[in-house]
Image: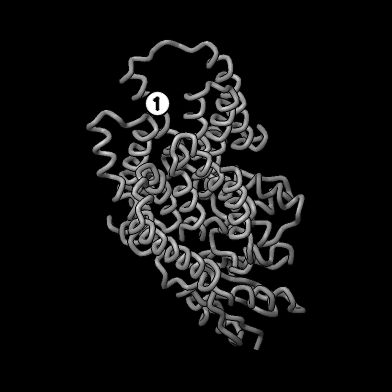
Amino acid sequence: MKKLLIVLAIIAILLRFYAVDARPMDHDESIHGYLSYILMKDKTYSYDPAYHGPFLYFSTAFVFSVFGDSKFTARIVPAVFSILGVIFALKFYRFNRNSHIFALIMLLSPSILYYSRYLRNDLIVLSSFIIVVYSYFSYREDRDPKYIYLGVIFSAIMVTSKENGYLYLGTIVSFILLRIAHEREFKIDKTFLKHFIPAVLIAFLIFSSLYTTGFSDLSGLKRATIDSFSHWFSMHRQNDHWKPIYYYGKMISEYEFLTLGITLAGIPEFIRRTRGKEVTEIELFAFYWLITALLIYHVFSHKVPWLLVHLVSPMAFFGSFYAGYLTRKPAIAIFSALLLATAGVAFYLTYVDSTNTEHDLIYIQAQKDVEVLAKRISEFNGSVLVFEPENDYWPLPWYLRDKGVAFSSTYYDGFDVVVTSENYLNFVEEKGYSPDKKYTIRPGHDMYWLHKS
């Protein structure tokens, strides 16, 4: 198992970091990267629920301070956490002899691989939760206090990374409370408390220091709790990023057919073991995680491709427990074919056609033109105004973060060049500018270079 762990870790590193800077920084990535850059450069940060938790910004700012700021370094933190997810998925071997199936899906899932190389919070939250679950069951088995600290600290990382970290925390805590109520295990373990209390204090220190920017903004604690919940419930009511109920089902069938297959194949065995009272606690948790995740993410109106990773992982975790059928030759052949097809889809989307928004998994991805335009602006020997009343000029601020370019929602005279979108093209032309070239920032959003007539 150690050899397999090393092999999978090496493959995960190669897949996560090979040409990781080839794809242009996307809209959200550029905002995350820019805020991390500002934090690194000016030591300023203020939590805003719209941009999720502070962990990504502080960790990325640290990476920038050590290795410099670039597309490559911007994507290091999510990639590293994704690798941890693969490693800990395999470490479940002590509870699940088919944990290599779970690890393979964490390694090769099209959605997980694509968003492992993306400056977002989701792989941080997901991998942290896998570590929390591993820590809980490991402590249940051998009572080693190190798992208390590991689980609680990664719980803090979850809830300081993204608001769905609270959903994950609620999943594991509610399961534990249900188990305690069912088993009537109300006796307090003094040895557990001896380590749990300091672990919680450490976690609270992480939580409070990040959300308050080193205790310089104590109102960050309110925004981290009350305001974050109210913001995302408001987004749900507004149908922000609304998609139909079948949205994830369609993408799972398109891209995650291997995971879907092992999930469906595992249900009869789970039912049989439950009826025969053979099911273990961790199997019950796998089912509980699967059902709660399916309910939560299908109920919320806010549906986007990167959230698919939060469905694929519990499906893979659950299905892997019942993959004993893979000892039979026909099943091995089918599984191998599906695994190769999954890997092919993942490689194509991640390394070949990573900016094509015709794929459901790729969402309003920035196009190569944005880098061409950014280079032209940075090399232009004159003054440039990027004028966009809706501030829809991202990811340009990331690319031009150290160039002193003016970005404005208000028009100002006196610039040699104005860059604007099609909506304001006529307005700028009336100010005496002539369009030179069009640049497709993302599908459906073009920007124009206009010079003084």
Q: Is residue 61 visible?
A: yes
Q: Nearer the viewer, residue 307 or 95?
A: 95
174 lies left or right of 439:
left
Quadrant of image for the C terminus: bottom right
Q: Residue at x 25, y 44 (%)?
A: 268
Bin the neighbour count of mark 1 within 10 Å (Cα to Cα): few under 14, some 14-19, many 20 and up: some
260 vs 55: above or below: below
Residue 233 in percent (x, y) is at: 37, 43
What amino acid is found at the position of numbered circle 1 in the picture?
A: Ile
The residue located at (53%, 73%) in the rendering is 352
**How far across and how far down the image is residue 302, in percent?**
37, 52
Q: Which residue is mark 1?
A: 176
The structure residue drawn at horizontal position 59% and vertical position 68%, both measured from the top left corner, is 23
Q: Quadrant of residue 378?
A: bottom right
Q: Nearer the viewer, residue 115 or 400?
A: 115
Kindly state the secondary structure of the residue where label 1 is placed: helix
Q: Quadrant of residue 340?
A: bottom left
Residue extending furthest front? 329
Q: Percent x, y for residue 166?
A: 45, 37
Instruction: Judge left or right: residue 3 versus residue 162.
Output: right
> Which quadrant of the structure image shows residue 240?
bottom left
Give the image location of residue 413, x and y in percent. Answer: 65, 75
Q: Tell me: 145 left or right of 183.
A: right
- Residue closer to the observer: 198 or 141: 141
**Which residue is found at the position 44% from the left and 38% from the top?**
96
Q: How many callouts does the rendering have? A: 1
Outermost left residue: 275
- Where the N terminus falls, by quadrant? top right
